[in-house]
Image (spheres, helix red, strand yellow):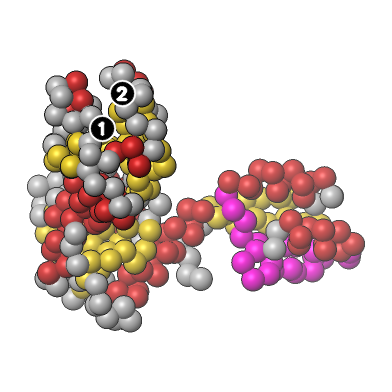
Amino acid sequence: MLRIAVPNKGSLSGPAAEMLHEAGYQQRRESKELRIVDPVNEVEFFYLRPRDIAIYVSSGRLDIGITGRDLLIDSGANAEEILPLGFARSTFRFASKPGTANAVEDLKGKTVATSYEGIVAKHLADQGIDASVVHLDGAVETAIELGVAEVIADVVETGTSLRNAGLEVFGEPIMKSEAVVIRRTGADGEEPKVQQFLRRLQGVLVARTYVMMDYDCRVEQLEKAVALTPGLESPTVSPLHNEGWVAVRAMVPAKEAQRIMDDLYDIGARAILTTAIHACRL
């Protein structure tokens, strides 16, 4: 039975459970449940603190887990990312009082406060910067005001909270994070149950990214229409009862669907429809 770690709370928890449900897996009904068994799919789910998941997976006690790329790197655990999941995205940046620093090179000899000591220490080491890193939990912006550090490193979304604290970001992003599937480094990547799990999640990602588009068009306009809707391999084309017309079906990116529909209409296509994709295998 495949043993999988899932975030039990925080920004990762809800989207992870939703994705697993869409992939056909049973999920817990109560937030107090720490473990459930899905006998149909031969999977056992363990609901753990997101920060701990990489440690459990690296120990080999659990086969795979869902956590944040930031938490994986920060943990220093012997685990690796095998599939990005596209949710819970965040960007890590340095910030300080204006005039303190303009680039990572300016951090030499300074103290950086952060809740992600592992990420920051690794980044500074990779850049060859000799700086001190202080670990703090919670709102690290206060560290500068209280003189604990000259610089902070934290998740930046709009930057509003930093500006309110009189701080500004500088330099290139330290890293960009999102939810990822992880496994122990060196584990058998061809294990059938793991591959099946990954295919299901990949199917959900594709289903969320694409829609199915159907339309009718004149035969003489088919090449132009196919250029607009090439599909993944090629579109399905079927003759209609009315001579000179064909029906076309293809997957198209959901974000571009409205524009494609406009372009198809302009070349004479009609009865243009889009349908959501609930599951797929590629």
Amino acid bearing label 1: Val
From the viewer's perspective, tell me whether residue 136 is left or right of residue 141.
left
Vertical arrangement, residue 277 with respect to residue 106, above or below = below
Query: Residue at the location (31% across, 64% down)?
Result: 81
Query: Residue at the location (68% across, 69% down)?
Result: 234
Vertical arrangement, residue 52 with respect to residue 187, above or below = above
Residue 268: percent from left, percent from top: 84, 50
Q: Which mark is residue 151?
A: 1
Callout 1: few (<14), some (14-19), or many (20+) C-alpha neighbours within 10 Å?
A: many
Q: Rounded to the nearest whole Å, what is the CA distance between mark 2 and mark 1?
A: 8 Å
Pointer 2: what residue? Answer: 97
Question: Where's the N terminus, which quadrant?
Answer: bottom left
Question: Can you tell which quarter of the image residue 63 is in?
Answer: bottom left
Query: In this orientation, does residue 152 appear?
Result: yes
SS under mark 1: strand
From the viewer's perspective, tell me whether residue 171 is left or right of residue 97.
right
Query: Residue at the location (42% across, 59% down)?
Result: 204
Query: In this orientation, does residue 112 appear?
Result: no
**Number of marks in the rendered image:** 2
SS under mark 2: loop
From the viewer's perspective, tell me whether residue 276 is left or right of residue 205.
right
272 or 77: which is nearer to us?
A: 77
Which residues fall within the magenta stretch? 231-254
